[in-house]
Amino acid sequence: MSGVDRGRMSAPRSLPTCRSCGGGRLRPFLSLGKTPLADALVTEDRLDHVDSAFPLDVAFCPECALVQILEEVPAERLFVDNYLYFSSFSDHLLQHAKEHVDGLVTSRGLGPGSFVVELASNDGYLLRNFEPHGVRVLGVDPAPDQAAAARDAGIPTVEEFFGVELARRIRAEHGPADVIIANNVMAHVPALNDFVGGMAELLADDGVVTVENPWVKDLVDNGEFDTIYHEHFCYYSCTSVDALVRRHGMFLNHVEYFPGLHGGTLRWHIGKREHVSAEARRMLDLERDSGLAGFEYYAHFADRVEDARTDLLTLLDQLKAEGASIAAYGAAAKGSTMLNYLGVGTEILDFVVDRNTWKQGKYMPGVHVPIRPVEALLDEQPDYVLVLAWNFLDEILAQQDEYRRRGGRFIRPVPAPEVIP
């Protein structure tokens, strides 16, 4: 991995206290070493430069049960300078977003008199589903390319980081929000209390916040270590979310579970009035009974991660020794963590494919594997494809039916290496 600088950059700020409750007894349980920023894709003119790498260590807070990384790279560097994720390139995610909106419109009786705000609205992929219902919407996203794409699609978008101050400005101009949506963003927030405090400031008294993030239980149980990267500051349970929102006068009232989304995703329904559903109580009880709120649950995760690394490297080395050609699918952040932790670059992988045209022509951080269009799988017909974006495995398998018909095989890397014909 000659493409990563392990010493030139000084370490980012190390966290002395919990991001949520401020507790000072954080207990580290996993180190993935120093890795490059997962979304900092490399352009061809920078291939001869050494990519900056930062420590990636994970800890548990025994006071509020929040799992979090210990380092803090400035948010502008993570989500403004390097961020090339566009939600609209996933058919699965688009369908999930539409179903989410349709459910909110029906359950909340949303219409022309309603106001919906989405935090991390990306390219407008979700908010555009409110248009047929006449609902007034506003997106908030600090990433310039995504915000511009949303505005081009007719979605009014504020290009800023969200917090209490911005929430007050939005409320003063537009009124309180009937619905706030925050999908796959709360993990990306270092200043949690400012972010959640902003939600409380903006939300109408009878409104609802829906927050989606992967469930830390699935991360641990299924060995999904590659979902850990610098852009993900926190890894949530219902227990940690409940403690966080109560600090701001809100309540975790309902929970939905989507096992097939991003390796296992929860949707938390949060409001200013407490009316906790049976499902929310069941999930909180499940976490308590499984030990999720205690350190022992995480204590041996590092050993399991190292075993998974060894098993996958053994498989890849064996396939290469047999003369097989191997590519990868998904230039996603989790793919960067996977390849850099494995130490796998162009000596194993010929290329990575991705549907996101913004990523094509660039190179994976650290390992500098080239990123090509998905059509390269049929053009080159590699023997195997390592699925780095395994959270969209079913969608990828259906999309690549012709590649499979020609004899190509896929490798799912977690929870254990599996060859899929």
Image (cartoon, grey):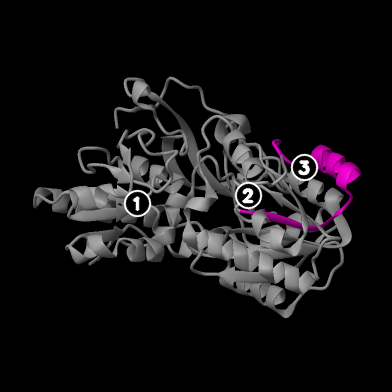
The quarter of the displayed image where residue 148 is located: top right
Residue 62 seen: no
Q: Give the range drawn in magenta.
A: 158-183
Residue 230 horizontal side relative to residue 382, left or right: right
Q: Position of residue 144 (x, y in %)?
A: 61, 34
Q: Which of marks 1 and 2 is in front?
A: 2
Return the residue at label 1: 306
Q: What element carries label 3?
A: helix
The quarter of the displayed image where residue 13 is located: top right
Q: Residue at x 71, y 48 (%)?
A: 20
Q: Is residue 238 magenta-colored?
A: no
Q: Position of residue 111 (x, y in %)?
A: 80, 65
Between residue 246 and residue 143, name the one nearer to us.
Answer: 143
Return the residue at label 2: 124
Q: What element carries label 2?
A: loop
Q: Where is residue 104 in the image (x, y as percent from the top left)?
A: 72, 68
Q: Is mark 1 on a helix, strand or loop?
A: helix
Q: Residue at x 20, y 38 (%)?
A: 347
Which of the two discs, 1 and 3, labels the residue nearer the N terminus? 3
Residue 99 horizontal side relative to residue 21, left or right: left
Between residue 180 and residue 356, name the one nearer to us.
Answer: 356
Q: Quadrant of the N terminus?
A: top left
Q: Is residue 174 magenta-colored?
A: yes
Name the amino acid, label 1: Glu
Q: In which quarter of the image is the C terminus?
A: bottom left
364 w.r.t. 120: above or below: above
